[in-house]
């Protein structure tokens, strides 16, 4: 991690006329604050965070940051392209979220801004964290009049490279430090990817029907929490669900405990990781909440991370859904959060 990570952060805020506002920090192109309008009250803060942006380096949960060059896990911290093996500086057996100095710890450059939109860029040199090719990422945050936050990613590389960019927002629609296990959840997903003990996909695609991973009918996040052996190693939900990848169709809807605020998520990625915040209060990741100064507990947020399949470089059977970035075919993906 850079010694200067999160020092002297530059913050920018975008908003609409309904009271929705989003504040972005240039370190990690990170969402510092996301306030959503709620009828009959002031706008709610719906993402976890610290009071002081300069303390962001004290957390190790990737709070609300841009993740790259490859979101989620790559088994054994390596992949092979055209007979060339690339090994990553991951600090662990398996590469997670781009390595020890991933995009979440980089200062992005703000190149344009308006009242409702911010555009950031980042250059990742050939060999950065072990990844091939010069990779140039553009991230655009836009707040719309119908209370959507849209994030657009454009990643160009001068070599073939597996790349997957997402945002690791930690959502709690209650608007305060609390558990999210009573949030209501409904998904369109009918399949998920089972994981091994190291959270690497086994290659199986499993139906969710009538099991703990079945959210096709609305239920609370906690109703079947830890009621499947798949949740033993992960201490809860931390699994990829498969989706159509259609920006016009929401694949999940979350609703706050009081029912006053809901959030739909859209993306053209083929999967998303749902993580129930099982390690927020583990080891050195314990941090004080911005609203009450108390330590955030486990399950104080849920992450919805649209992405390619985790470890897709080692899952050739799904290659069509998880293409490499090439000089001719850039990464071009979007995520939309809609609040109502």
Image: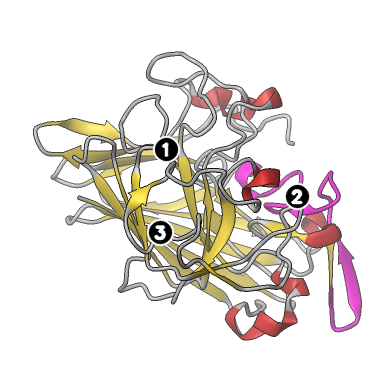
Query: Tag 1, which secondary structure?
Result: loop
Q: Residue at the location (21% across, 34% down)?
A: 43
> Do the CB atoms of the residues marked 1 and 2 lie less than 8 Å apart?
no
Horizontal relation, residue 230 to residue 254: left or right: right
Query: Tag 3, which secondary structure?
Result: loop
| Residue 220 rendering spot, x and y as whole percentages | 37, 45
- Which residues make up the magenta segment? 80-106
| Residue position marked by numbered label 2 in the rendering | 99
Looking at marks 1 and 2 on the same chain, the residue that comes earlier in the sequence is marked by: 2
Looking at marks 3 and 2 on the same chain, the residue that comes earlier in the sequence is marked by: 2
**Distance from Cα at disc 3 to Cα at disc 1:** 14 Å
Q: Tag 2: Cα neighbours inside 10 Å, few (<14), some, or many (≥20)?
A: many
Does residue 139 lie above or below 296 as drawn?
below
**Residue 69 tag number:** none
**Distance from Cα at disc 3 to Cα at disc 2:** 32 Å
Q: Residue at the location (67% across, 78% down)?
A: 324
Q: Quadrant of the N terminus?
A: top right
In the rendered image, residue 134 lying in the magenta stretch gets the answer no
Q: Residue at the location (37% across, 64% down)?
A: 216
**Distance from Cα at disc 1 to Cα at disc 2:** 30 Å
- Furthest toward the left, the residue is 40
| Residue position marked by numbered label 1 in the rendering | 181
Does residue 283 lie above or below 314 as drawn?
above
In the rendered image, residue 98 lying in the magenta stretch gets the answer yes
Query: Tag 2, which secondary structure?
Result: loop
- On the question of residue 327 being in view, the answer is no
């Amino acid at each position: 991690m850079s010694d200067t990570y999160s020092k002297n952060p530059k913050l920018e805020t975008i908003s609409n006329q309904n009271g929705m506002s989003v504040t972005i920090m240039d370190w990690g192109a990170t969402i510092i604050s996301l306030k959503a309008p709620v009828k009959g009250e002031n706008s709610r803060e719906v993402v976890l965070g610290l009071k002081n942006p300069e303390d962001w380096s004290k957390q190790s949960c990737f709070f609300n940051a841009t993740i790259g060059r490859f979101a989620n896990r790559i088994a054994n911290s390596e992949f092979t392209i055209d007979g060339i093996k690339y090994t990553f500086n991951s600090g662990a057996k398996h590469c997670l979220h781009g390595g020890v100095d991933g995009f979440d710890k980089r200062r992005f450059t703000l190149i344009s801004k308006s009242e409702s939109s911010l555009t950031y860029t980042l250059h990742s040199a050939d060999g950065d964290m072990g990844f091939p090719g010069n990779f140039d990422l553009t991230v655009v945050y836009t707040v719309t009049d119908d209370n959507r936050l849209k994030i657009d990613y454009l990643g160009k590389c001068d070599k073939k490279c597996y790349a997957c960019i997402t945002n690791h927002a930690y959502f709690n629609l209650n608007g305060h430090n609390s558990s999210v296990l009573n949030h209501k959840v409904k998904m369109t997903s009918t399949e998920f990817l089972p994981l091994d003990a190291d959270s690497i996909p086994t290659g199986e695609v499993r139906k969710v029907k009538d099991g703990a991973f079945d959210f096709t009918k609305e239920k609370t996040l906690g109703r079947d929490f830890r009621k499947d052996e798949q949740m033993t190693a992960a201490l809860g939900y931390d699994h990829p669900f498969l989706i159509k990848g259609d920006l016009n169709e929401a694949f999940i809807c979350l609703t706050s405990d009081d029912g006053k605020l809901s959030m739909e998520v859209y993306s053209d990625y083929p999967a998303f990781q749902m993580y129930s915040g099982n390690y927020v209060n583990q080891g050195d990741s314990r941090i004080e909440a911005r609203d009450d100064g108390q330590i955030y507990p486990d399950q104080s947020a849920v992450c919805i991370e649209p992405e390619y399949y985790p470890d897709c470089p080692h899952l050739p059977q799904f290659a069509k859904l998880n293409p490499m970035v090439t000089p001719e075919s850039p990464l071009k993906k979007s995520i939309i959060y809609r609040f109502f």
